[in-house]
Amino acid sequence: MTSDQPLDRRSFVKKASVTAISFAVGASLWSCNKKDEAPKENSGPGSMPSNMKATKLSPAETSAMVSKFEAAGVMTMEHPGKWKGKEGSHIPQVTMHKGEGAITLFTKHPMSPKHWITAHYLKDQDGKLIGFQLYEGTDKEARHRFMIPKGTTRITAYSHCNKHGDWKAADQKTG
Ligand SMILES: [Fe+2]
């Protein structure tokens, strides 16, 4: 997908559903947290990181989806490209919950079945994906609280819109 070829809801849902179904069958132990629920802590070695469980996708599938988002380019406040003027409604707002090891991402963007924020995700100081949350156009808003893994010193937050592509907030310290 590129920003010139917006992913409509039908094709996005179709692709996401195929992925979700394929993993749901083979990994029924993976829970699917509601967005408003606090993520559960990791349950042991080799377990799915709690920030990833919310999507039903494996880390590999989630990484593949992020790579696809980013292949079309990542826009920022300084470099919005052809979508200049849409920074405020696409760059995620980051709220740190100091002392709780958590942050909330919120993107002030309208949510509708034809145009919506499809996902939020987080990377750490090494560029490692540490959180991912999918949304649907029928969701009231794009907002999710993520637990920050221990050892994380900086985070970068991303938001993906089905029409206006991938957007990155300025990275910041976790503490
Ligand atoms: Fe948008």
Image (cartoon, rainbow, N blue to C red):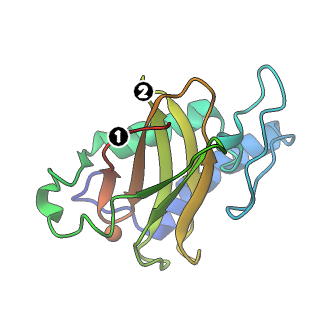
Q: Amino acid at mark 1?
A: Asp
Front-most of residues 35 and 115:
35
Determine the secondary structure under disc 2. Answer: loop
Q: Is residue 175 left or right of residue 26?
A: left
Task: Give the labeled residue for mark 2.
Answer: 125
Determine the secondary structure under disc 1. Answer: loop
Q: State whether residue 169 is above or below residue 153.
A: below
Task: Give the labeled residue for mark 1.
Answer: 171
Front-most of residues 62 and 171:
171
Residue at image coords 57%, 41%: 131
Residue, far top: 45
Residue at image coords 57%, 68%: 136
Check disc 2: other Cα within 10 Å, few if <14, some if 14-19, many if 20+. Answer: some
Q: State whether residue 127 is above or below residue 40.
A: above
Q: Amino acid at mark 2?
A: Gln
Front-most of residues 71 and 166:
166
Image coords of residue 28 (percent x, y): 85, 42
Image coords of residue 122 (percent x, y): 48, 42
Image coords of residue 114 (percent x, y): 43, 77
Q: How far apart, in angstroms, are the residues tagged by discs 1 and 2?
A: 9 Å
Whether the residue under disc 2 has CB within 8 Å of ligand 1? no
Q: Nearer the N terminus, badge 1 or badge 2?
A: 2
Image coords of residue 140 (percent x, y): 57, 78
Tag 1 near tag 2, CB within 8 Å: yes
The quarter holding residue 125 reads top left
Q: In terms of image quarters, where does ligand 1 lie?
A: bottom left
Tag shown at residue 160: none
Q: Is residue 34 left or right of residue 141?
A: right
Q: State whether residue 46 is above or below residue 155.
A: above
Q: Is residue 147 left or right of residue 80?
A: right
